[in-house]
Image: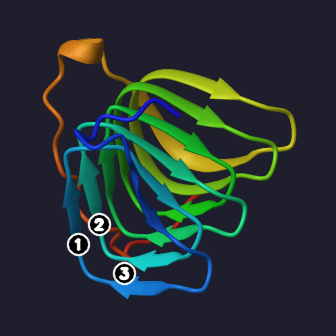
Amino acid sequence: MKNNDVNGQYSRIENSTNIKGDIISEGDFRIDGKLQGSIKTNGKIVIGKEGFIKGGVSCRNADVEGKIKGNLFVSESLNLRSTSNIEGEVIIGKLIVESGATFNASCSMNKEGSKAEIQLVSKLDESREKTA
């Protein structure tokens, strides 16, 4: 993983950790635990197989093996591994999907690509009606 942090380290939420709240970071972030809230970074977000986010995600690049239930804004590329499960609204620059990935989301391509400003998307509104 390419690190954006000055000290060469990236932030990490271990699989035994549950966090409620919002995270804002300048560097890369790896989530193997659970986050109920939103995360915003100018770097890359990696969601491990056991990782789960319920809330908004905003980043430059994302590599997902776990589950996200919420809205995503990825200014460059979203890479969905075979074990990934995405539910919500997604705005991306580029989408890469492995066979076996679950993608139950409305998706639009960001025409500005990497020039788009990173923005924090709102949390998933669970009161809305789900459609097929």
Quick one: label 2, few (<14), some, or many (20+) residues within 10 Å?
Answer: many
User: Disc 1 designates what residue?
Assistant: 22
In the image, taking residue 92 as reference, residue 23 lies left or right, namely: left
User: Disc 3 designates what residue?
Assistant: 127
Mark 2 to mark 3 CA distance (whole Å): 18 Å
Along the viewing direction, whichever of 14 and 122 lies nearer the viewer: 14
Whether residue 121 is situated above or below residue 129 in the rendered picture? above
Whether residue 78 is situated above or below residue 87 in the rendered picture? above
Residue 87 figure quarter: bottom right
Determine the residue positioned at 25% across, 46% down.
41
- Whether pointer 2 and pointer 3 mark residues with C-beta atoms closer than 8 Å, the reply is no
Determine the residue positioned at 43% across, 76% down.
35
Secondary structure under the numbered disc 2 in the rendered image: loop
- Going by the numbered disc 2, the residue's amino acid type is Ser
Quick one: label 3, few (<14), some, or many (20+) residues within 10 Å?
Answer: few
User: Disc 2 designates what residue?
Assistant: 38
Along the viewing direction, whichever of 10 and 36 lies nearer the viewer: 10
Determine the residue positioned at 48% across, 43% down.
106
Q: Earlier in the sequence, mark 1 or mark 2?
A: 1
- Going by the numbered disc 3, the residue's amino acid type is Ser
On the image, the x and y values in percent for residue 17 come to 51, 85
Mark 1 to mark 3 CA distance (whole Å): 21 Å
On the image, the x and y values in percent for residue 102 come to 74, 50
Quick one: label 1, few (<14), some, or many (20+) residues within 10 Å?
Answer: some
Whether residue 69 is situated above or below residue 89 in the rendered picture? below
On the image, the x and y values in percent for residue 91 come to 37, 35
- Whether pointer 1 and pointer 2 mark residues with C-beta atoms closer than 8 Å, the reply is yes
